[in-house]
């Protein structure tokens, strides 16, 4: 009898990679994630597809970029033709592989907490989003669970009442129940995202702690997009050169969720020790870098919010205590896991299988990663509303095209703080323009609904062609064959034979 194939994805919300001791010693305590890194491969150059909760998850669990799957802002549901990881695995294996999703979902178009409805492909006995959690609480405990003051109230906020603890317990039960079967489990914590509820000793652990000052905290933002200055607000007039972020509840919750991850890792070690374990976070947090700290993330492509933790442990396959500089993207999670379960990767998926980089830290399978921004939140008029950004990073240079604002180019190797915007004075104009062409080609290849001449004709792109009604003059149809009929050619009514063709 063949061994079961098992994979567990553990993710958190709003944790940048240097908040973990395995990436950088800042005094924050994360012994369990650090131990996971010591037993596997830690990736230095992993990136989210959009530095905001819903869009980041939409890419992770569909294998399509937010602009392709419909979920390009919080509160926006992925579209009906987009299928998620659980549905693909369940359908492809005729239900032989158990799929569980426990925790924050954020992809159904509901409010922040979700609709409490299990999506196709996942076991409804284990489905547990934040609406399910709140439905278990009394009205009084609901109010407590949304108020950070609960951390310091008399008696504190009990561990048993936290979302993280209940998610961990449900995930533990799933692992024990299916220990002898093939399964794919996603454990998606909301913590340490605000309100950052946590019990003692974590609630008091960092009362006198300050995160080390950011070397780029005093960025004057003069040659940066205006939206960043609006985001900085009153910080523009403050001395931020030695600003050390004081956020005791956030940091306490950061260590608390690590403790909960430790509970789960212990059960994995006892029950499914050979399973593939992947740890990541949806995006990072500015923590005062570039004078930006309100809300933690926003319409910017800076390393602090896009360069996320990514740790892989796979006993017998990944080396222990290894570090990889390979570029990797959240968009790669779904195709990698499909391949892990022996499922052919559909043509429409926009990421790649990263098993080669998991097993050999010297292997790099990507030349670049892509990041985007559309809208922070569908429900809110604030947070700078609609701010379309398309970005590419090749491991050294990062080009961000801010459609309605100033574009940015950074040499991240020479300028890791991304302080000097080189867009009008690049050391290599050919490289800048090549990266721009890469973005344009990516937008076309992924059928970006916002693609058009305005992305091509930037003030600094002196060789851009004149505006054209036809733009590229191409038709680009979907090539989805698993869940919908083959598309037809508009001109003939017959089966489309070339998806990309002159119009």
Image: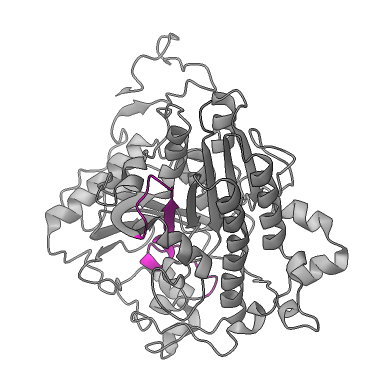
User: Magenta stretch?
Assistant: 294-321
Give the image quarter of residue 135: bottom right
Residue 304 on the magenta span: yes
The one of 482 and 258 positioned closer to us in this rendering: 258
- Where does the image place residue 61, in percent across and percent down from the top left? 52, 43
Does residue 282 sit above or below 442 in this rendering?
below
Q: Residue at x 43, y 68 (%)?
A: 227
313 vs 153, left or right, is: left
The one of 323 and 234 positioned closer to us in this rendering: 323
- Where does the image place residue 202, in percent across and percent down from the top left? 63, 78
Q: Is residue 402 visible?
A: no
Q: Is residue 173 visible?
A: yes
- Where does the image place residue 49, in percent across and percent down from the top left? 43, 51
Does residue 286 sit above or below 301 in this rendering?
below
Q: How is the image coloured?
A: one colour
185 vs 403, left or right, is: right
Does residue 207 sit above or below 333 in this rendering?
below
Residue 77 on the magenta span: no
Q: Main secondary structure of the magenta part?
A: loop
What quarter of the picture does the C terminus occupy? top left
């Amino acid at each position: 009898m063949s061994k079961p194939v098992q994979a567990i994805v553990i993710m958190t919300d709003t944790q940048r990679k240097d908040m973990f001791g395995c990436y950088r010693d800042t005094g924050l305590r994360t012994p369990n994630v650090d131990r996971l890194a010591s037993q596997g491969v830690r990736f230095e150059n992993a990136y989210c597809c959009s530095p905001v909760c819903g869009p980041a998850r939409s890419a992770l669990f569909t294998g399509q970029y937010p602009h392709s799957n419909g979920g390009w802002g919080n509160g926006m549901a992925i579209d009906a033709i987009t299928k998620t990881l659980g549905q693909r695995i369940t359908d492809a294996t005729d239900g032989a592989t158990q799929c569980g999703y426990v925790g924050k979902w954020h992809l159904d178009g509901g409010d922040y907490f979700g609709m409490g409805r299990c999506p196709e492909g996942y076991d409804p006995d284990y489905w547990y989003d934040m609406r399910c959690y709140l439905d278990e609480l009394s009205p009084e405990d609901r109010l407590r669970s949304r108020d950070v003051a609960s951390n310091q109230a008399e008696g504190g906020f009990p561990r048993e009442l936290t979302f993280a603890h209940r998610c961990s317990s449900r995930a533990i039960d799933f692992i024990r129940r299916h220990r002898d079967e093939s399964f794919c489990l996603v454990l998606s914590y909301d913590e340490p995202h605000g309100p950052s509820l946590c019990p003692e000793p974590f609630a008091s652990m960092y009362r006198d702690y300050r995160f080390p000052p950011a070397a780029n905290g005093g960025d004057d933002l003069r040659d940066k997009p205006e939206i960043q200055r609006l985001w900085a607000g009153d910080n523009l007039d403050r001395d931020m050169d030695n600003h050390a972020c004081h956020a005791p509840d956030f940091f306490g919750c950061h260590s608390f969720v690590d403790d909960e991850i430790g509970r789960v890792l212990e059960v994995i070690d006892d029950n499914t020790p050979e399973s593939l374990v992947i740890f990541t976070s949806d995006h990072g947090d500015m923590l005062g870098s570039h004078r930006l700290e309100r809300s933690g993330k926003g319409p910017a492509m800076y390393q602090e919010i896009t360069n996320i933790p990514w740790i892989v442990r796979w006993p017998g396959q990944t080396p222990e205590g290894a570090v990889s500089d390979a570029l990797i993207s959240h968009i790669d999670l779904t195709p990698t896991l499909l391949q892990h379960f022996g499922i052919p990767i559909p043509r429409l998926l926009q990421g790649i299988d990263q098993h080669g980089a998991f097993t050999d830290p010297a292997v790099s399978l990507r030349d670049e990663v892509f990041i985007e921004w559309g809208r922070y939140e569908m429900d809110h008029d604030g947070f700078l509303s609609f701010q379309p950004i398309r970005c590419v990073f090749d491991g050294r240079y990062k080009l961000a095209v801010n459609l309605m604002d100033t574009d940015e180019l950074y040499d991240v190797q020479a300028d890791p703080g991304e302080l000097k915007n080189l867009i009008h004075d690049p050391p290599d104009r050919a490289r800048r323009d090549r990266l721009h062409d890469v973005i344009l080609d990516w937008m076309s290849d992924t059928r970006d609904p916002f693609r058009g001449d305005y992305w091509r004709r930037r003030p600094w792109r002196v060789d851009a062609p004149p505006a054209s009604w036809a733009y590229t003059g191409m038709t680009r149809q979907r090539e989805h064959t698993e869940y919908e009929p083959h598309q037809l050619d508009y001109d003939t009514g017959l089966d489309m034979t070339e998806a990309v063709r002159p119009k």
